[in-house]
Image (spheres, helix red, strand yellow):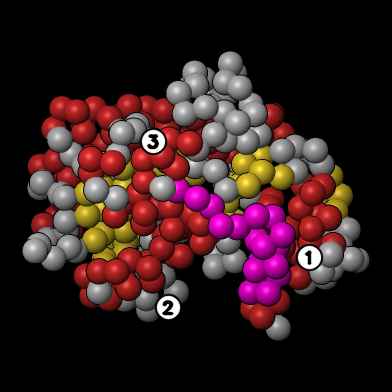
């Protein structure tokens, strides 16, 4: 059987940081090459500095390391993208097309490219949003993810590339901070609460959004990538659900451990983005095709986050 060598693009980001050790476990420590624009602060294993918008640098890296799978996790997220839409579009699309092209030309076995709940917007039902809803994104990030999903399906259909994707909800983790997203409040609040600080929330207290704990997001990613190809019926991107909650519900869950937590609600431009997104997601296609089932609810997520962060800040 062919041995896999895996490349993570965007390895220093929120998902890359947590995914790296799991991929090292599955494929062997030296068979996973982490890459990002800058070296990480501590040694995590084989690492190459890479700007994925540079097609020659990417092709060279894939050839040198005999890469057979790519996890492409680098992207400008929803809130940050709005500060410079053309830059965000350019970066997100260039990196995506470079990944798809190098995978086609060098005949990679499998590719993972995440999408997001940001693909949904006006016209899509906001409760239990179905897999095949109308896609009218409200942000440049969402537009780039809708385009990406169509490119993935195109490369699969036209070239037979085995590229797989999940529409991640807001991902909550203790390992590293997200950057530039609309769901980031749900991570920051834990850091402030555990340090005994008050928290200024940039969303209104009743803004319900779909979220997922990192362990579930990673398990979903690996279950999708390890599923037999014939089980994958969605070649754009699968809806994925973990849980849904509002800032007020999250605050109440944290106050069970830290009753003195004070949250001030100061909605900013991210409120409109959040209001254009689903409140909950119908992920029955993922459940049917490859057996997806989330394990973490709000209570369990809160307990895990507080335990891990309390140990970190001690
Ligand atoms: C964001 O808030 O932009 C991301 C996402 C939902 O894709 N976390």
Element type at marker 1? helix
The residue where tag 3 is placed is 237
Residue at 26%, 53% in the rendered image? 70
Beta carbon of the mark 2 residue lies under 8 A of ligand 1: no
At a point 82% along the width and 42% down the height, the residue shown is 205
In the picture, measured across the screen, residue 237 lies left or right of residue 283, that is left
Front residue of 49/297: it is 297
Q: Is residue 9 magenta?
A: no
Q: Secondary structure at mark 2?
A: loop
Image coords of residue 17 (percent x, y): 44, 65
Residue wearing tag 2? 42
Badge 3: residue crowd in 10 Å (few <14, some 14–19, many ≥20): many
Dot 1 corresponds to which residue? Answer: 193
Tell me which segment is drawn in magenta. 292-309
Instruction: Using the image, determine if residue 54 lies above or below residue 216.
Output: above
Q: Nearer the viewer, residue 26 or 69?
A: 26
Quarter holding the N terminus? bottom left
């Amino acid at each position: 059987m062919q041995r896999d060598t895996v490349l993570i693009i965007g390895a220093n980001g929120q998902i890359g940081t947590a995914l790296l050790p799991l991929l090292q476990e599955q494929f062997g420590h030296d068979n996973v090459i982490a890459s990002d624009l800058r070296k990480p602060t501590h040694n995590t294993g084989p690492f190459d500095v890479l700007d994925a918008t540079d097609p020659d640098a990417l092709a060279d890296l894939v050839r040198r390391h005999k890469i057979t799978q790519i996890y492409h996790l680098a992207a400008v997220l929803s809130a940050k993208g709005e500060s410079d839409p053309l830059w965000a579009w350019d970066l997100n699309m260039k990196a995506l097309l470079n990944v798809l092209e190098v995978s086609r030309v060098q005949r990679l076995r499998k590719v993972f490219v995440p999408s997001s709940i940001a693909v949904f917007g006006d016209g899509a039902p906001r409760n239990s949003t179905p897999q095949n809803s109308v896609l009218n994104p409200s942000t440049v990030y969402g537009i780039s993810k809708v385009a990406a999903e169509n490119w993935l399906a195109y490369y699969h259909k036209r070239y037979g590339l085995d590229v797989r994707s999940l529409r991640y909800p807001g991902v909550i983790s203790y390992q590293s901070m997200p950057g530039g997203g609309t769901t980031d409040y749900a991570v920051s609040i834990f850091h402030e609460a555990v340090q005994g600080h008050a928290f200024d929330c940039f969303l209104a207290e009743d803004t319900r959004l779909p979220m997922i704990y990192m362990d579930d997001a990673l398990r979903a990613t690996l279950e999708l990538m390890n599923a037999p190809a014939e089980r994958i019926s969605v070649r754009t991107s699968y809806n994925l659900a973990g849980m849904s909650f509002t800032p007020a519900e999250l605050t109440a869950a944290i106050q069970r451990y830290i009753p003195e937590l004070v949250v001030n609600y100061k909605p900013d431009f991210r409120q409109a983005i959040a209001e254009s997104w689903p409140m909950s997601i119908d992920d029955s296609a993922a459940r049917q095709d490859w057996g997806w089932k989330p394990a973490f609810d709000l209570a369990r997520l809160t307990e895990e986050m507080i335990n891990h962060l309390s140990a970190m800040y001690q």
